[in-house]
Amino acid sequence: MGEGRSREAQTPPVDVVAGVIRDKAGRILLARRTEGRDLAGLWEFPGGKREPGESPEAALARELHEELGIDIDCGAPLIAVPQRYPHKRLRLDVRMVGAWRGTVKGLDGQALAWAPPHTLASYQMPPADIPVVAALLQPDRYLVTPAPDGSDAAWLESLERALDAGIRRVQLRAPHCASARWTQLVEAAVDACRRHGAEVLVNGDIALAQALRIGVHLRAAQLMQLDVRPLAEGMRVGASCHTLDELRRAESLGCDFAVVGPVADTLTHPDATPLGWTGFAALREEVALPMYAIGGMGAQDIDVARAHGAQGIAAIRGLWPT
Ligand SMILES: Nc1nc2c([nH]c(=O)n2[C@H]2C[C@H](O)[C@@H](COP(=O)(O)OP(=O)(O)OP(=O)(O)O)O2)c(=O)[nH]1
Ligand SMILES: [Mg+2]
């Protein structure tokens, strides 16, 4: 890290607040940034800079009144994304908009689009918006399975209970499990996940992922040895990352998301120094990937994770029914 960079790291981020506005059909409003401003031509969630002393809620209401001519009730926080751009740092605080009144108009001459949620990824957006779109569309909990230490039936029963409890993204992982037994168990688990409409990735085994047409979750060392995305587009690729180099590789390979940690102390890696939320956010702002926080996490940590730009949390113990 050069001297210029470390000085820049100390400039405080610009506080931006933006809103997710939906119509009765569930479509989401996007605005196109006008010519002559930074990031011109890209689509964004309407909003703007917070003024000194202004609350995020008041700033969002003011911006949407000025830019769109509507009056809003500010709803729940969705995600707050720290992001570094070449000439500034940003914290993009995105709120769900509850009720709103008036007729939406592009008062700054900006183009507007009502996007059905599944089309959001087809709009060109600034880097900070990639985690925002993922927060709208993808699961906030990522279950990593523990090794089956008892019977296979008991392990499958726990998986089933996790799926019943609403888990919709699962990584099948069993570091010390013999391979024939594991392959059989993976097949049964994939079946259970499909029945529940949950997405499933297998840890490390690219060939098995291809054979079963499921996703793959890359280990950090494996990630660094790859030069191309190991599965076709449409098949999920996740990656475990601990450093900025690994995150940059995950981003350049076109991984769908990364898992980053340990954020807190964890029994899985007792010797690792936790990143803390500040360390997590510092990595977060350098890449435009959806990132799950892992290490001592449970469902109760999702809100704080989202406030630091995470997609949500990943966990073994914290999400596995006992
Ligand atoms: N509103 C909004 N801004 C975003 C998004 N994503 C993203 O990177 N940004 C960046 C672009 C800008 O650098 C910054 C927002 O500043 P802005 O220039 O739009 O602020 P503003 O509406 O107050 O307008 P201005 O009068 O200061 O030009 O945040 C997004 O989804 N919505
Ligand atoms: Mg604006």
Image (cartoon, rainbow, N blue to C red):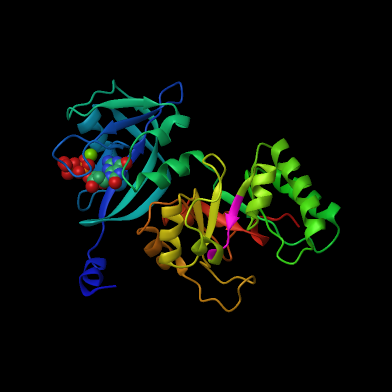
Return the residue found at the far bottom. Answer: 271
Quarter of the image containing the N terminus? bottom left
| Vertical position of residue 45 compared to residue 115: above or below | below
Q: Residue at x 22, y 66 (%)?
A: 8
Would you say 124 lies left or right of 149 here? left
- x then y, percent, for residue 78: 43, 44
Note whether residue 260 is visible.
Answer: no
- x then y, percent, for residue 313: 55, 55
Would you say 253 lies left or right of 52 here? right
- x then y, percent, for residue 289: 43, 52
The picture quadrant where one finds residue 69 is top left
Q: How many marks?
A: 0
Return the residue found at the far left. Answer: 36
Quarter of the image containing the C terminus? bottom right
Q: Residue at x 27, y 39 (%)?
A: 47
Q: Residue at x 23, y 56 (%)?
A: 86
Q: Residue at x 84, y 55 (%)?
A: 152
- x then y, percent, for residue 275: 46, 70
| Vertical position of residue 123 compared to residue 165: above or below | above
Would you say 313 lies left or right of 48 here? right
Of the four image quadrants, the one with ligand 2 is: top left
Viewer-nearest residue: 91 or 119: 119
Magenta segment main secondary structure: strand
| Vertical position of residue 104 compared to residue 46: above or below | above
- The magenta stretch spans which residues? 216-220
Q: Tell me, yes or no, whether the highlighted magenta stretch contains residue 218.
A: yes
Q: Tell me, yes or no, whether the highlighted magenta stretch contains residue 80.
A: no
